[in-house]
Amino acid sequence: MTSPYTQARRWLLPTLAGAALGAAGTLHAQTPPEVLVVGQIAEPKALDPAQVTAVNDFRIMMNLYDGLVRYTDGSLEVEPALASDWTISDDGTVYTFTLRDDVSFHDGSAFDAEAVVFNFERMLDEAHPYHDTGPFPLAFFFDAIEEVEATGEHEVTFTLEEPYAPFLSNLAYPTGLIVSPAAVEEHGEEIGRHPSGTGPFRFEEWESNRRVVVTRNPDYWDGAPELEAVVFRPITDANTRVSEMLAGGIDLMVEVPPDNVAMFAEDPMFEVHEQAGPHLWFLILNMREGPFTDPRMRQAINYAIDKQALVEDVLQGTAEVAAGPIPPAFEWAYNAELEPYPHAPERARELIAEAGHEGAELTFYVTDGGSGMLDPIPMGAAIQADLAEVGLDVSIETYEWNTFLDRVNPGLEGKADMAQMAWMTNDPDTLPFLALRTDAMPDQGGFNSGYYSNAEVDELLEQARRSTDQAERAELYRRMQVIVHEEAPWAFVANWKQNAVTTADVEGFRLQPSFFLLLHDVAKR
Amino acid sequence: MTRYALRRLLMTIPVLLGLSVIVFLIMSLIPGDPAQAILGSYATPENLERLRADLGLDLPLPQQYLVWLGNILQGDLGRSFTLNRPVLDEVLERFGATLILAGTSLVLCVLVGVAAGIVSAVRQYGWSDRLITLLVLIGISVPAFWLGMLMIMTFAVGLRWFPASGMTAAYGGGGWLDILHHLVLPAIALAVVAAGVIARLTRSNMLEVLRQDYIRTARAKGLDEGRVVLRHAFKVALVNLIPVIGVQAGFVIGGAVYIETVFQWPGIGRMLVNAISTRDILLVQGGVLVVAASYVFFNLCADLLQHWLDPRIKA
């Protein structure tokens, strides 16, 4: 007869044996050669460029699709892609693109002018038979388009309602990527899970919450990629992403937590990549009421915050100190003469005294996370401490991200004196145009939640948007930056440096200022 | 018993309906909506309005609910706003993964918990009892997510015996052996607390039963000790353990939320957390309904099993 121990052994042993078998049965750790495994921050929402808004989804799609134009390697300037050439009419309203004639979609259908027209009409024309395959949340990027027309088999003409300089840059953005019309017709509203483009990799499979697999497109017009396949794995938890990198389960991880960057940098098995991007982290100051109606108080805040300590200690070097409203990643439009406000608590105290607001009580909106917000709670606390240093009494109110946007976007009046905010954009026009103009007040549908208004800034931004000459635009933006820096409607804090870690086996990888992940030239040894 | 089971199943309908109303109300009370979550920085009032109309969020709330209810009666759980995918597809896929994890964990914690409890009771105050009691105390006190992280650092990063996360190999893979290999760490991490609870209750139930007269009689008859413990004592103790195991089943599914996050298991817990933060109300509804229904189902199974083991218990 069996004793309880024998009985227990009977249960336990097979369980343990099963576990051991599992361990031995599958050879683990190293990812397969020629296949790059990427640790993503989340499950993609869809792989239809017209439908998505998240950088996380862009990272996959930029490898599946091409646009008419693209950003050159390492910059935010536009170069030809599916369009080999283009002309712009003198008044800046007619863009004529000559398309490549040697390209076909992954599903075998031909890429031509009709395909381009299909893509834009699908997004913009409510009467289009496939408009119901949306919604298309970023379609407003192309609101300026009055008409898009196939003026030849390989020539397409866009007519704009008015001159709109960011148009080319928007075409290089994922919303402008070209999808196979045949695939849209075949899959309808499921197109987001059956992507077909012209890019260096072809879509292979998508297993929900496990992986998206793409494979080499041997016929790619710009040369076949070296990798045989890329696997994108969603690993939402940053700690798990780090563990998986250390365990050898992934070859490349993006958005490394600041705490782990140094560890990877010291290990010869890994390589850390960093790239500042078109990102700005700032504080919106309420200029309609309270202490920040006085420009001296706004400058005082900029002097009082120890931005260097923030980027070094809180963000552990994953960001750089910001100088003004346009991030340096927009090299051509950035005003390099602009110096960040230095950390000068003495100067801040003087300005506060001059303004007569010693010991002012301020309400500060802080969020717990959100797109581009970096580490908002510790950053909020550090800023609170810096302001206490100069005698300001800051009380923090923390809100969950969506709640936070719901409070901040309608304007700070009656609620708070200052609020955290961050933006990532693809054109120097976007952020100031949507958040600093008089016509962009919240009640007019803009994001000017701190109510900044300066007629000269308004004029400069309007002009820059209408000009099709990049040098002229750059000059206008530089003048705008000087004014905004001086008047300080915001406290300019940080420009995020995007980071990634690869194993030492990965070659040819480079982060892009656009924050896109381009794997065309990557190889694994 | 069949009538009882049917009645219990019918009673779940008003429970689930009530639950769906509550979820709908709560989701509408918290600020922000899917349009806001989708557009993020670009959520101008104009864009929001456009997207809300596209998503059907501009309808009055009662109407949204009735549309949802009407669809669900036809077996249509709607389309997720954020994933742009039928809710049913997503929920079933995710729930399948959770069942694999929670099911394995449940089997594991019952086997280990019961075995430890029996040994502990039979050897009361012996060294094995003390050791088991200590381990149980540790098991119950350790936060599952922390244990999970510790296990990842030890067995995935350090020893490289098991993968650190996921359910299948990144490339290729997908067979049952592959899944089993990925299952070991999260299933154990998830089982530990429940195993501790079951071990404690098994021990106390067994101790109570072992003191009964009929056990003494059985021993006096010269029956083998193993037979006395397992056939006579454990079978009786089991009757009281079944409902506990039923409750633990619900607990394990609930606890899966943390473990799924730590191990990136593609289950329904993680899906719900995401769906709530993106205000994807239809996805939340679908997920909550499935989880609640399974909870009710497990408890029903436990009741029926208990009734079957001891017909004196009124069904």
Image (spheres, coloured by chain):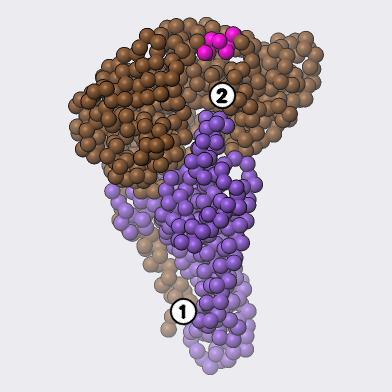
User: Is residue B110 positioned above or below B175 on the image?
Assistant: below
The number of numbered discs placed on residues in the rendered structure image is: 2
Q: CA distance from mark 2 to mark 1?
A: 68 Å
Q: Colour of chain A?
A: brown
Q: Check disc 2 and give the amino acid type.
A: Trp
Label 1: chain letter = A
- Residue at 35% of width from left, 51% of height from top? B168
Please say whether residue A137 is one of the residues in the magenta stretch. no
Where is residue A374? Give x, y as percent: 54, 30
Question: Residue A236 location, x and y as percent?
Answer: 47, 42
Q: Nearer the viewer, residue A177 or A393?
A: A177
Q: In screen coordinates, is A208 left or right of B275?
A: left
Residue B279 horizontal/vertical position (percent): 55, 45
Disc 1 secondary structure class: loop
* The magenta stretch spans residue A461: yes
Q: Residues within 10 Å of mark 2 (few under 14, many from 20)?
A: many
Are tags 2 and 1 found on a single chain?
A: yes
Magenta stretch secondary structure, dominant: helix
Figure check: B133 above or below A313 = below
Give the residue number, with chain letter if any, for mark 2: A281
Q: Dividing the image into 4 quarters, which one contains the C terminus of chain A?
A: top left
Residue at 63 percent across and 45 percent down: it is B30
Q: Name the N-terminal-most of marks 2 and 1.
A: 1
Viewer-closest of B50 and B305: B50
Please give the name of the residue rendered at 40% of the width and 26% of the height, measured from the top-left corner. Answer: A173
Is residue A119 among the parts visible in the rendering?
yes
Up the image or down, B202 lies above or below A120; here it is below
Identify residue for label 1: A3
Residue in the image at 40% along x and 67% along y: A13
Q: Which residues fall within the magenta stretch?
A: A456-462
Chain at tag 2 = A
